[in-house]
């Protein structure tokens, strides 16, 4: 019997099945199975099939010192672990309009200005559109050579002919190989495109930056195999309406994944925000419900303002809205406040948000949330002398304050911006009730 011309593959895990399923038998995701062209069978036995390999001790492997290329964008270099490694493949994902093309254009512009051979391959926008963007950017953006193409073959041929040191492919989802019948962006296509680009890049030492789309849920579109294939996965996040954007490494074979870069979208492109703390502190209000959190973004301390609003409600259950903090941590903080600080907010709507569109994903934000909530519930401002009050620390389930990493660096950052009063674990208070009393002065007793 002739083999059917197509197979079905999961866009999430790459699992292949002979027929369509509503739910992937591999990863059990719903609606991820799509039809793909069956790849042509390779005839014959590979000539190297039976050849035994000769293992070499690692110490004898020649490893030339890698000379990383600086993109001229400090925040991007830091997230990459100190610059781009020649021959590596970097995937940058982010939601539409977040600034992926702007960031990669600016990086290539700087590399070109530093005398590097670069190439920009655009499949999404015309050369004229890319030029318009480059005009906004400072540096050598206008000297970057561009090729507009969506077919894989010519792109690979161009890479081999030009042999650039760094090449941007915007985006990996629009490139396709006509030998496969799946549409551009489908599992088979993305896997093939990335795999072949990788082979060419590694062979000639070209660093390739792939721009990728993200799905509605925020994960990178395309098969998971793409993330396994590349050396580095960066995620560009932020809300489109806000100007702040953060760049994080989700995977990095050449550096830490703790680093975060902060950018601001301006008229002249993405501007690095080196002193993000200064900006957030100067914007901090001293109204009830506001406190400054000394958080850590990777290895760097960052001061952000945490705000809370507590309003009476008839709704059952009441609203719990968390922006920039984890909803489950908010639920935990509310429970600890009710049980261990006598502050029950069961009849109120509660909103907590981190100002500036920043996301804080660490337990160290608990105490700041608790203080902001208590202050909002009492309508009393937190006393930090004439500057805003700062705080950090984790809340334990029994109402104790728990230590978090890098306490000295957080305190040093607060001191640098003149925040004299910081409530933290290991300070004068070691229970949440004492911490709230210290923050609110005598006003907690009425609530308790
Ligand atoms: N003159 C300008 N001043 C400030 N910001 C601008 C200006 N022009 C464009 N922008 C910003 O740049 C963003 C577009 O950036 P860019 O094209 O790099 O995003 P992208 O992530 O590549 O998007 P896509 O997913 O569509 O490719 C817009 O959302 C807008 O916020
Ligand atoms: Mg783009």
Image (spheres, helix red, strand yellow):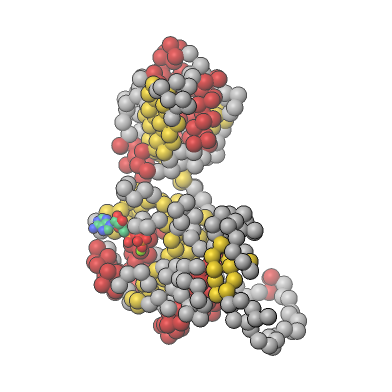
Q: Is residue 186 left or right of residue 267?
A: right
Q: Is residue 256 visible?
A: no
Residue at image x 45%, y 71%?
Answer: 184
Specify the quadrant of the image occupied by residue 110: bottom left
Q: Is residue 215 above or below residue 107?
A: above
Q: Position of residue 229 (x, y in %)?
A: 56, 67
Residue at image x 54%, y 79%?
Answer: 203
Between 384 and 352, the residue placed more toward the observer is 352
Q: Position of residue 223 (x, y in %)?
A: 54, 63
Q: Position of residue 38 (x, y in %)?
A: 58, 76
Q: Is residue 342 visible?
A: yes
Specify the quadrant of the image occupied by residue 32: bottom right
Q: Position of residue 410 (x, y in %)?
A: 46, 38
Between 424 and 29, the residue placed more toward the observer is 29
Q: Quadrant of the N terminus?
A: bottom right
Specify the quadrant of the image occupied by residue 157: bottom left
Q: Is residue 98 above or below residue 163?
A: above
Between 145 and 303, the residue placed more toward the observer is 145
User: Quarter for ligand 1?
Assistant: bottom left
């Amino acid at each position: 019997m002739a083999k059917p011309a197509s197979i079905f593959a999961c866009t999430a895990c790459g699992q292949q099945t002979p027929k369509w399923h509503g739910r992937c038998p591999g990863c059990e995701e719903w609606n991820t199975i799509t039809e793909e062209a069956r790849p042509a069978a390779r005839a014959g036995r590979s000539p190297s099939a039976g050849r035994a390999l000769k293992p070499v001790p690692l110490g004898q492997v020649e490893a030339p010192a890698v000379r990383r290329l600086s993109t001229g964008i400090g925040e991007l270099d830091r997230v990459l672990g100190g610059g781009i490694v020649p021959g590596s493949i970097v995937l940058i994902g982010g939601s539409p309009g977040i600034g992926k093309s702007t960031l990669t254009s600016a990086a290539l512009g700087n590399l070109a200005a530093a005398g590097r051979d670069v190439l920009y391959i655009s499949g999404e926008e015309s050369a004229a559109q890319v030029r318009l963007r480059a005009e906004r950017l400072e540096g050598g953006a206008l000297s970057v050579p561009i090729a507009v193409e969506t077919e894989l073959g010519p792109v690979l041929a161009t890479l081999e002919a030009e042999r650039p040191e760094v090449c941007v492919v915007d985006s990996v989802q629009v490139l396709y190989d006509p030998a496969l019948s799946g549409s551009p962006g489908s599992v088979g296509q993305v896997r093939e495109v990335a795999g072949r680009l990788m082979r060419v890049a590694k062979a000639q030492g070209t660093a390739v930056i792939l721009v990728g789309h993200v799905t509605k849920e925020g994960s990178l579109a395309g098969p998971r195999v793409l993330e396994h294939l590349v050396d580095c996965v960066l995620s560009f996040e932020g809300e489109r309406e806000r100007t702040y954007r953060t760049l994080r490494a989700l995977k990095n074979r050449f550096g830490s994944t703790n680093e975060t870069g902060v950018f601001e979208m301006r008229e002249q492109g993405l501007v690095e925000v080196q002193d993000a703390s200064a900006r957030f502190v100067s914007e901090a209000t001293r109204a009830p419900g506001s406190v400054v959190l000394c958080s850590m973004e990777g290895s760097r301390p960052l001061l952000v303002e945490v705000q809370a609003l507590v309003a009476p409600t008839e709704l059952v259950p009441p609203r719990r809205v968390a922006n920039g903090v984890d909803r489950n941590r908010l639920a935990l903080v509310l429970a600890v406040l009710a049980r261990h600080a006598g502050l029950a907010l069961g009849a109120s709507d509660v909103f907590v948000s981190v100002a500036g569109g920043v996301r804080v994903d660490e337990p160290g934000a608990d105490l700041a949330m608790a203080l902001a909530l208590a202050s909002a519930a009492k309508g009393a401002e937190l006393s930090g002398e004439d500057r805003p009050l700062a705080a950090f620390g984790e809340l334990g389930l029994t109402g104790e304050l728990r230590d978090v990493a890098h306490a000295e660096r957080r305190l040093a950052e607060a001191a640098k911006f003149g925040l004299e009063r910081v409530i933290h674990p290991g300070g004068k208070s070691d229970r949440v009730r004492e911490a709230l009393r210290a923050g609110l002065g005598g006003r907690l007793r009425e609530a308790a």
